[in-house]
Structures are given as C-alpha cells and as structure tokens.
Image (spheres, rainbow, N blue to C red):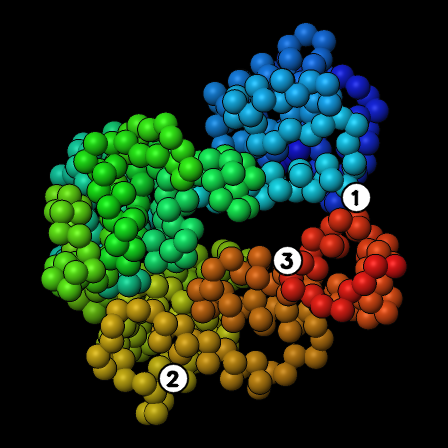
Amino acid sequence: MKPIWIVDDDESIRWVLEKALARESLSTRSFTNARDAMTALQTEAPQVLVSDIRMHGASGLELLQVVKAKHPGLPVIIMTAFSDLDSAVAAFQGGAFEYLAKPFDLDKAVELIRRALDESLRESSVEQTISETPEILGQAPAMQDVFRAIGRLSQSNVTVLITGESGSGKELVARALHKHSPRASQPFIALNTAAIPKDLLESELFGHERGAFTGAQTTRRGRFEQAEGGTLFLDEIGDMPFDLQTRLLRVLSDGHFYRVGGHQPLKANVRVIAATHQNLETRVKEGLFREDLYHRLNVIRLRLPSLRERREDIPLLAKFFLAQSAKQLGVDVKRLSEPAVHYLSTLDFPGNVRQLENLCNWITVMAPGQTVEIPDLPQDLTSTAQVSVSAPFNGEARLANEVIGNSIAAAVTESAPQNWHDLLETEAASLLAAAEPEVIVKLGKEFEAIVIRAALKYTHGRKNDAAVRLGIGRNTITRKIQELGIVGAKED
C-alpha cells in the first residue's frame, strides 16, 4: 500500500499526524509546501492526501486541482480553520473527499483518514491495468473462432454481448477486446451485476451525490465515470433489476446519466461490453428483461465455448494453472502424469475453466509428490461414488467448488494440524481452492474478531482497557467492534 501524504507548513501538525498514523501502522510522507507535493506527483502518488488549505506559496486548493487532474480517484482531505468555511465549500466543489476543521480531535482525524483509505483501496481494486490480464489460452477450433472474432473487432467501438456458461472465461474475452481496441490506454472497469445488492447497484453504476441517501457522506463516482474513455464490462447482465435496465438503456441511447441524488446530467464516453450465462431471449419472453435493451446490447454476439467443447485445451490450461498457482504460493511447479492428463480430458468440467483452475490450486496445495497421478486427484473426481460430471448442470461453478472444498476438508482431517499457523494455512488453502473472493479480507476480519474478543475477555469487557492492551486507539476498537458485530464490550 502506498503512503499517506501530509502537506502542511506547520511542523507540529505534521508531527502529530505522523505519530498518530504510525500507531495505526500506516506509512506517511510529509511535505512543507504544496509545490514540493506537486513535483512528487509527477512520478508517484499517495494512497490518500491530507493538505492544509492555506500555506506559503501555492494553496491546498491549487494542489487539489493538480491532484484531481492527474489522479481523479485519489481521496484528498483538506484541513481548514473554523473561520475558513467558505474555503471548505470551495474544497468540496473542487472534488475533496472531506474537510478537517482545525483544531481537530486526533482520533476523529485518524478515523476520517481511515475512511478515505478504504475508499482509495476500493477504487484501486476496480481500476486494474490491462497489463495484469492473463493471456487467453486455447488451440481448439472453437477458441480459434473466438480469437478471429476478437481480431475483427479490434478497431471497433461497437457494443458486444458475450454469452457462455459460468466459468468459461467471459471476462477474459472482454479484457482482450479492450486490450486490442482504440481504448486500450484508458480504464477497463468490470462489474458483476448479480453480485451487488439491488439497493446498491444503481449507486455502483452511476455514483451518488453527498447526502443522496443515509450513509452517503461524500460524493462518489460510479462505474461509468471510472470507465470514462475506456470500457465498462457488465457481467451477468441478465440478472440486472428491471428498473435499472431502463436507466442503462437511456445511457446506451443518448450517452447521458445522472448520479443518484444528482440534477446535472453527465456525459458518458464508454464502450459497454456485456456478458451473461442466461438465455436473454427467454428472459425477454418471460418479461424479466427489456426487449429494447436486449437489442441495444446484442449488436455483436460472441459465444464462448464450454470446456467440454474444447477438451484438447485441457492439458495446456492445466499446465498454465499449475505454474500460476505454484508462483503465487512460492513452491515448485507440480506436473500431471500422462494418465492423469488423459483422465482429466475425459471429464465434463461443469464449472468450465474456473473449475479446472480451482482443481489446479488444490493439486498444488494438497497433492503429494511433484508428479501427480490419478489416485492423487480429489477423491470426488476419481471414486465410483462421485457426483457424475456428465450429469445435467446449470452452468454455475458452485458444485465444482464444493467438490474441491470437500476433498480439502477430508485431507485436513487426516493431517490434523497441531498449531494455529497450520490451521490458518489450511483454512487459507481451502478458501483459495474454492475460489472465494477477498480471502485475505475474510481471514483478516476473523483474526481481528478473535483477538479483540480475547482482549475483552481478559479485561472483563472493558473496551478502553482492551484497546490499550492491544496497542490500538479507542476509536479504532469501537469501530472494529461495530464492524465485526462483537458483543459484551463496555466502557471503562
């Protein structure tokens, strides 16, 4: 994570913030004036920037303008005196994340910087560069047809609808379309419309104004603004709520949209690529998907074959995933024996490429020896009692994850780890093999909850005493108790 920059000509303010953030294990870099910060911005950027508004030389508002021109998603907190609220209003109009009134409560200042940090990390997670995109692998004729289609569309901005079963690699194709398009130097932003609750999806797509609803403490850019000039990939478009389909149709029709709670129209220069594993024609007939939106999206349709339609690619993909998994875990690459490769090539893989990747992760962690034979594969894939891989399947990868997860659970029972490091490593391996999202966040929260509960038990529920024992601030432990749903805490 990048450091937090502090810009202030008052040495005492810099010192106080540096020490407070250091206690939170957050790295900082300080500047005595805005000009030095502007110069540093030419070659690097912070995770969050905290700046005074009035300094010798350039002001904090001038620095804010430079930041927003170069890094529009970077949260900037402007510090200002109580008598300078007009400047605070100007700061908000210039795109500041929040303002911090001097003199300030240190715990509240750290809490505000934490909120800005969370926003910055969330923005970073969606603005991935195309250079991080793995290659699309495939020698089968069905995949060669896909490659040819990507080539034909390389210089086009036309809307594309990608269809195919879950786990077949639709997002990789969307990234490839972006990478080989005139928009390649601009952002590629992906959003799974089925993974966002209905009440939040509108804000995720179009953003919201400060105060638009309860909890909207700052103005926030939506995915359309994040993808400006680039490509917006809408996965599982068939699950989009009907009322939001109307708003999406309007953007595709005239290129304009409004933030939630906003009154000024915003222009969207974005190429939309959509994907679905569902039959949209059927959804239209059932009244679950707008027919006019379907025709807007279905300009060019690109069908992605299932893995069972390209079995000859299984050895190539397995070799790639085993190498990738070994690199991520820092271990030697395992290889499949010829009989094992042949056996895997006979399976239907209802979870498609995602299921094969999960299996390779499992092999890297759990299989004995460097050469993997058929008996070393998960028992659910090799025993006579296994769920038939050729049985009808709806295209989701859930069954594949359960198969791998159950095999890991069995292996864990047999190996019986003796200390918490082994248990943590085993749990991490299980989540990784099951393709759980945000593994480090999930385990981190569980770890924090266990440690805080232990501290509260030790201090008989006294929250502030527990914070001192843990070496964290009072506001920090209060926030974490609320976030983690811990009960039984009380004031000292």
Distance from Cα at disc 3 to Cα at disc 1: 20 Å
The structure residue drawn at horizontal position 79% and vertical position 36%, both measured from the top left corner, is 105
Distance from Cα at disc 2 to Cα at disc 1: 48 Å
Q: Nearer the viewer, residue 60 or 369?
A: 60
The spot of residue 291 in percent (x, y) is 13, 52
The structure residue drawn at horizontal position 20% and vertical position 60%, both measured from the top left corner, is 288
Q: Secondary structure at mark 2?
A: helix
Residue at far bottom of view? 384
Q: Amino acid at mark 3?
A: Glu
Say whether residue 222 is left or right of residue 352: right
Q: Amino acid at mark 2?
A: Asp
Q: Earlier in the sequence, mark 2 or mark 3?
A: 2
The structure residue drawn at horizontal position 27% and vertical position 46%, both measured from the top left corner, is 174
| 475 vs 261: above or below | below
The structure residue drawn at horizontal position 51% and vertical position 36%, both measured from the top left corner, is 210
Q: Earlier in the sequence, mark 3 or mark 1?
A: 1
The spot of residue 285 in percent (x, y) is 11, 62
Say whether residue 75 is left or right of residue 488: left
The spot of residue 9 in percent (x, y) is 76, 17
Say whether residue 394 is left or right of residue 385: left
Q: Secondary structure at mark 3?
A: helix
Residue at which label 1 appears = 23
State the mark number for residue 239: none
* Screen quadrant of the C terminus: bottom right
Q: Nearer the viewer, residue 371 or 415?
A: 415
Say whether residue 352 is left or right of residue 441: left
* Screen quadrant of the N terminus: top right
Residue at which label 3 appears = 483
Residue at which label 2 appears = 380
Tag 3 near tag 1, CB within 8 Å: no
